[in-house]
Amino acid sequence: MLNKVFLIGRLTRDPEIRFLPSGTQVTTFSIAVNRRYKAGEDWREETYYFDIETFGNLAERLGRQLNKGTQILVEGQLRQDRWETSSGEKRSKIKVVADKVNLIGGMPRDQQQSATTMSEEAPLDLPEEIDDALDTDEDVPF
């Protein structure tokens, strides 16, 4: 089965850092992703918000380097958390667990790193469509 997500967006708030009982760091944040489309003769824009979660060394680096407004590319997978409230209601939430995060802009100059890849693995080889989208100042067409 395939479960792979690529998102480009900006952080909506500073990252939140917490630690698991094992001592592993977990860094969570949300990003806003815009979708621009044409409806008749008018251009419209929708914004979607996604919760992102990272663990370990990646979480430590992101917790130090990211802040509200930073533009990033996230590669990860979807995860559904399920739970039951104290009143017996079933709840669920979908989030993205990031494997890799690229900084692509939006940081102050003293912290900026052009297209820096942070991951537990080798640098991300972007699909051609995403790589082309990063090379332009125009909005991503999807």
Image (cartoon, rainbow, N blue to C red):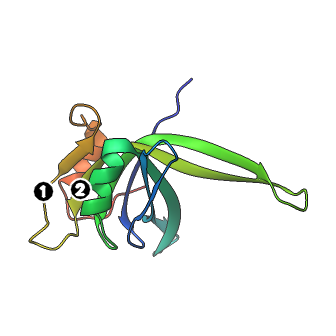
Q: Residue placed at 52% from the left, 65% from the top?
A: 48
**Mark 1 is on which residue type?**
Ser
As drawn, which residue projects farthest toward the right? 88
Could you say which disc has been placed on residue 103 in the image? 2
The one of 62 and 126 positioned closer to us in this rendering: 62
Q: Quadrant of residue 17?
A: bottom left
- The answer to whether residue 68 is above or below residue 140 is below
Could you say which disc has been placed on residue 114 in the image? 1
Residue 83 location (% of width, % of height): 76, 50
Name the secondary structure under disc 1: loop
Quadrant housing the N terminus = top right
Name the secondary structure under disc 2: strand
Q: Would residue 88 appear left or right of 102 to someone viewing this image?
A: right
Q: Residue placed at 51% from the left, 59% from the top?
A: 50
Other-residue count near label 1 (Cα within 10 Å), few / some / many at <14 / 14–19 / ≥20? few
Q: Would residue 92 appear left or right of 134 to someone viewing this image?
A: right
